[in-house]
Every structure is written in structure tokens, then in C-alpha cells.
Image (tube, coloured by chain):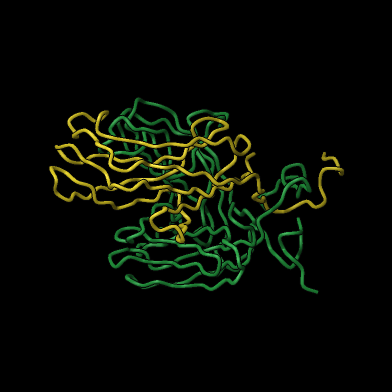
Amino acid sequence: MPVNPRSFLINTDYPIDQVVYLRSGLESIGASSSGTITIAHGLSFIPLLGGSWSLNSDFSVQYEYYSGTFPSGSVSTNLYGVELDITANSTNIIIGYENTLGATTVYFRIFGLQPSDSNVDIEPTASSADNFVIDTNLNYTKIYEAETIVVASGNTYTITHGLGYRPQVTAWKTDTSGFRSPIDFQEPSTLSFDSVEVTTTTVVFTIPAFSFSNRIDYRIYYEESA
Amino acid sequence: MVKPANFIINTDYATLKNDSSTIVTVTFAGSQDIPASVTAAGSTLQATTDVVIGQIGSITRTQIASSKDSTKFRATRVLNLRRTGTVLASPAVYNPVTFAYRLNATTIRCVYHVLNPYSEILTTEAANETITFDITTFLPPFV
């Protein structure tokens, strides 16, 4: 019998995101500096990464990757005062940082999802039942479609979802050197950045002519955007 | 130990829990003069809207659209625009940046930010532009 997936907290017909990698840490960074923090992830695939970072150990104020304190100390060249980005290749997670302010310590949290074309056993990320419970007070985004596509430079790829509303979408790009990162910067003219356009009927991925991306991993969720 | 009243299923893998959602608009007025980029602090203009959303530690998932292309929401954290104003009465391209960032523990600030890259006064496009931020928040495993 058909059901409305938005009406159920848990329904085994509709999978939810499973976090297969977790990592947290900290790093001291110098004033007006840039660099990278490299972490071996130990996975047999390149994870789909997300997470947050903070200037406080308690994460009372936290930022997503590709975001940070605003404004920067040099508005003509940097949007953020301190910004962290994140990418991964087959062996490592690489956190890039750019600091236009004084010396500080950055605290980072990383979670990783498994790409749809990976089919390997993975150690559970839950160490005890206390940590990860499905709470009936909360909803969980349910996956409508999780796929991997290849889009040649200068082309678009359209997915017709037919949901009738604008769903939540997350996407990651992989460049020709094997680095995978969230798609977080876009411009309508698609001159420079890979684009993910969401409508009530379609999701359109656009890869600019001179982009180095050649693979997109995406997740379309049953949940509507706001 | 956990309280059975609070949950129905344990998971072997951590999950991303839905938290909250909202729609925020930011309007940038047209025909504004931005001083020449002589000093970094004086060469920008911003329009902002603040919204209290999400629990402490929540992460945002954002879709952004401009009133000049209102049917096209893009799943992104930063949307770069390309607009044409005037400098010394001649057309001049500039690049507004729209984004949402965490202002403090409870507030997200949505921003329309313009930097004047020219050494003369930049007058922005004549029409007002409204940016719609469609923000959902979710709780990562660390929270």
C-alpha cells in the first residue's frame, strides 16, 4: 500500500543517511596563515564528507566547512576571517585553512557517508546504544535517491524527481585528480562553479566548461526544503 | 543506559537528525553608491537579515535564489552573482556574494555582500534584488 514518506519517522522502505566515519580534532594555526591538516581516513572508498568547525572547544559557535567568521581582515581578497574547507581522496581527508586574523586554535568535527557505488563492510560508528538512538521526537531525512553520475565538462545532467515540491539535496564533486568535496559555491552563470539547481520537478547538475569535476555524488531527500 | 520512553530503535551507524527549517529574505536596495576601493573597510555594502534557528551544534543545509531568477533555487552555501552597475557613467560588472553564516550560537545571518573592485564610485544596479534563503538545520552525530 503506498504511503507518504513525509508522514513517517521511520519506514524501512525509505533509507536514511548512515554515518560511516566520525572524527574530531584540533589544530593551532598561525596569524595570517594558510595551510592544510591531513588525516588518514582508512576507508576503502572516498567518503562523502560533512561536518563543522569552531574556534571554541565546546562548539558553542560553529561554522560549516567553506564558511567562517565574517568579515575577514582583508575584504578585498577574503570573505571570511578564518575559513576551513574539506576534501578527501582515496587515502586522506584534507582540511584546508585560511586565516586572515591572529593566531588561533581551530576545532573540527567530520562525518562521512558512503558513496552509492561502494559496497563494502564497514565497522559500526556506534560504540554503545547510548550514543545513537532513533529518537521519536525528531524526524530523519529519508533518501529518495542516492546516486553517482558522470557529467562531462560543459554539460548538464537533469534528474526528474516528480516529487511536486522542492526537496532537500546534497551533492559532492570529484575532480580529475581524485579529490572529493561538497559542492558549496555556485553562480547562476555557471562560469566557474559546479551548480545544483533544484525545482519542484527536477534537479539539474551543471558542470562548467573548464571545471575539473568529472563525477557527482548526490542525495535527494524526501523532505521538502523549508 | 537509555530511557525506553525516548527512543524506538538503536542504530549501528550514527544518523543525521532533522532539527528546524525556515525561509529568510534579504533585500538589497538598487542604485546605491559604493565608495572607491581606497580603503578595505569603506568599499563594501551589505544587506543582512538575522534569524534564530536550530539547536546549538546544528548544521545548515541551504538553498538560495535571487528575485532576478526566482524559480532557480541552488543547493549551496555561497551563491556568487554577476551584476552590472555603473562607474563614471559607464557599465561596470561587479560580483555580489550571498551566503548565510553562523553569527552566534543561536543566530544565522543571511548576507548580500558587494565589494567595489574599482578605484571610482560604483553605483549598483537600479532595481532592488531580494535573495531568498531556504534554510534547514540538522543535528550531526556529535550533538
Colour of chain A, in one word, is: green
Query: Measured along the vertical axis of the image, is residue A67 above or below residue A145?
Result: above
Residue A88 showing in the rendered view: no
Residue at the spot x=26%, y=44% of the render? B124
Q: Dividing the picture into quarters, in which one does residue A123 lie?
A: bottom right
Residue B36 visible in this rendered orientation of the protein? yes
- Residue under the point 28% across and 38% down: B32
Locate residue A124, reporting x and y percent: 68, 54
- Residue A114 position in % (x across, y down): 57, 60
Relative vertical location of residue A32 with respect to residue A129 in this rendering, above or below: above
A134 or A104: nearer the viewer: A134
Residue B104 horizontal/vertical position (percent)? 52, 30
Figure check: A102 above or below A218: above
How many circles with numbers are drawn on the protein?
0
Compared across the picture, whether A214 is left or right of B103 comes to left
Is A10 left, or right, of A223 in this rendering? right
Q: Residue furthest right?
A: B4
Percent of width and height locating residue B82: 29, 53
Which residue is at a point 19% across and 49% down the rendered structure image? B92
Quadrant of the image containing the N terminus of chain A:
bottom right
Q: Front-most of B18 and A22? A: B18
Tell me if B44 is positioned left or right of A20 in this view. left
Apparent colour of chain B: yellow
